[in-house]
Image: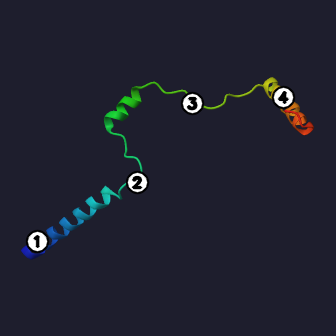
């Protein structure tokens, strides 16, 4: 009875070690994750405005189209 209990305890210890290894996972590549204090500070900081182009109105699109048509016509003629 005592031998069976010792075997079960040894098996439990091996399983606990295997579970701990699996929970650690594989090492990350690239940047390290932020620390918790940094995440708290980032959560309270105001969000930055996204960069990029805004939307063009129909009139703006038409003006760009006219400018580009003139640009390519001048290029075709040999002017700059």
Residue lying furthest left: 2
Q: Is residue 60 left or right of residue 50?
A: right
Label 2 crowding class (10 Å Cα cut-off): few <14, some 14-19, many 20+?
Answer: few
Q: Is residue 48 left or right of residue 73?
A: left
* Residue 6, label in figure: 1
Picture residue at 14% right of the left edge, 67% below the top: 9
Circle nearer the N terminus (2, 3): 2
Q: Kindly indicate whether the residue at mark 1 contacts the one at mark 3 (C-beta within 8 angstroms).
A: no
Please state which of the two labelled residues, at mark 1 or mark 4, is closer to the viewer: 4
Disc 2 is placed on an element classified as loop
Picture residue at 36% right of the left edge, 40% below the top: 34
Residue 32: image location, x then y, percent: 37, 46
Q: Kindly indicate whether the residue at mark 1 contacts the one at mark 2 (C-beta within 8 angstroms).
A: no
Residue 66 appearing in the image: yes
Q: Quadrant of the N terminus?
A: bottom left
User: What residue is pinned by disc 2?
Assistant: 29
Circle nearer the N terminus (1, 4): 1
Disc 1 is placed on an element classified as helix
Circle nearer the N terminus (3, 1): 1
């Amino acid at each position: 009875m005592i031998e069976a209990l010792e075997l079960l305890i040894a098996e439990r210890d091996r399983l606990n070690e295997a579970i701990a290894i699996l929970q650690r996972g594989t090492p990350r590549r690239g940047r390290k994750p932020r620390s918790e204090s940094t995440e708290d500070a980032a959560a309270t900081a105001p969000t930055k405005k996204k960069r990029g182009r805004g939307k063009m109105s129909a009139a703006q699109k038409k003006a760009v189209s006219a400018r580009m048509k003139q640009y390519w016509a001048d290029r075709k003629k040999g002017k700059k």
